[in-house]
Image (spheres, rainbow, N blue to C red):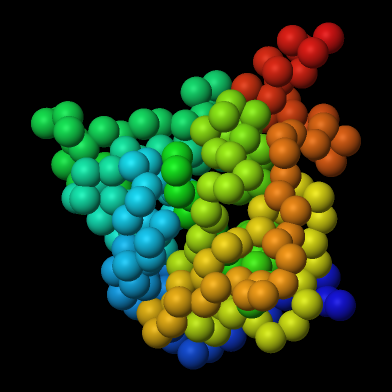
Amino acid sequence: MRDKWAIREDVWTALETARVVRGKSVHDKIPHFIGCGVAASLATELPEWEAARAIKSNPDQAQRPLRQLALEQGKLLYMAVPRLRDERVFIELDPTRPEVEPAKAATISGAFQVGRSVAVNRQGVRVGKGGGYADLEYGLAAAAGVVHPDTPVISTVHAMQVLDEDLPYTQHDVPLAVVITPDAIIRCNAGGAALPRPTGIYWDDLDERKIRSIPLLARLRAEMG
């Protein structure tokens, strides 16, 4: 099995070579892929989306159309502060408030979670850009009761990001229930057992530098004694 960095490098290079992403380079980023708006529209057809009152999303450009649609459809939107650099790690945007404009709020930087991915497979394993923030966001949200074991987690990606191979998976990785490309809705691990989800923060997987760089983690550790 290839390691995560080899997978990331291959996917980033392939997307750039095929010219299916926006910007000069997507290396070290969540790819802003061409067709992300179409994928977002497909995501809103999911029954899980229709039933959701609140959406938790990452702040990356690839998911901006999905965040905008959430607000336009009257859903509460929870967004993580980039790099979790504020103790208030989630921002709530309520579309019923007159000062919230969907297009602007979706750019600034529940019951349904949108995950960031560089690569995914049909078993629901995802590979992020390597910062570990997506998994930490989920762990913090799970600890706070914002997400639950049955909260659907989805990701919108380009078809080239869907790999037909096993991907590395650890206890803190967040598995996907659904992957949406501009052309298809993929139910992950259909017919198989669901992959286990993180239940909180795995302190042994965090180094000292990461803990100190995230104010909420530093406070939580101090409270633990």
Q: In the current view of this chain or complex, which residue is farthest to the bottom?
A: 18
Which one is in front, 71 or 5? 71
Looking at the rendered image, the quarter that the C terminus falls into is top right
Q: In which quarter of the image is residue 49?
A: bottom left
Say which residue appears at 53% left-offset and 88% top-offset: 17
Visible in this render: residue 6?
no
Q: Position of residue 72 (x, y in %)?
A: 19, 50
Question: Most extreme residue toward the front, as rendered?
Answer: 191
Position of 186 relative to 214 (above/below): below
Q: Nearer the viewer, residue 6 or 199?
A: 199
Percent across and percent down for residue 102 are 20, 46
Q: Quadrant of the N terminus?
A: bottom right
* x and y percentages locating residue 110 in the rendered image: 45, 40
Which residue is located at x 40 percent, y 31 percent? 91
Q: Residue at position x 37%, y 41% from top?
A: 54
- Taking the spot 57% from the left edge, 63% from the top edge, the residue there is 177
Q: Taking 61 as reference, is 198 above or below it? A: above
Say left or right for 113 vs 91: right
Which one is nearer the viewer's eye here, 129 or 1? 1
Q: In x, y percent, where is residue 165?
A: 74, 83
- Can you tell which quarter of the image residue 145 is in? top right
Above or below for 45 versus 151: below
Give the total number of marks visible in the rendering. Answer: 0
Residue 113 in view of the camera: yes
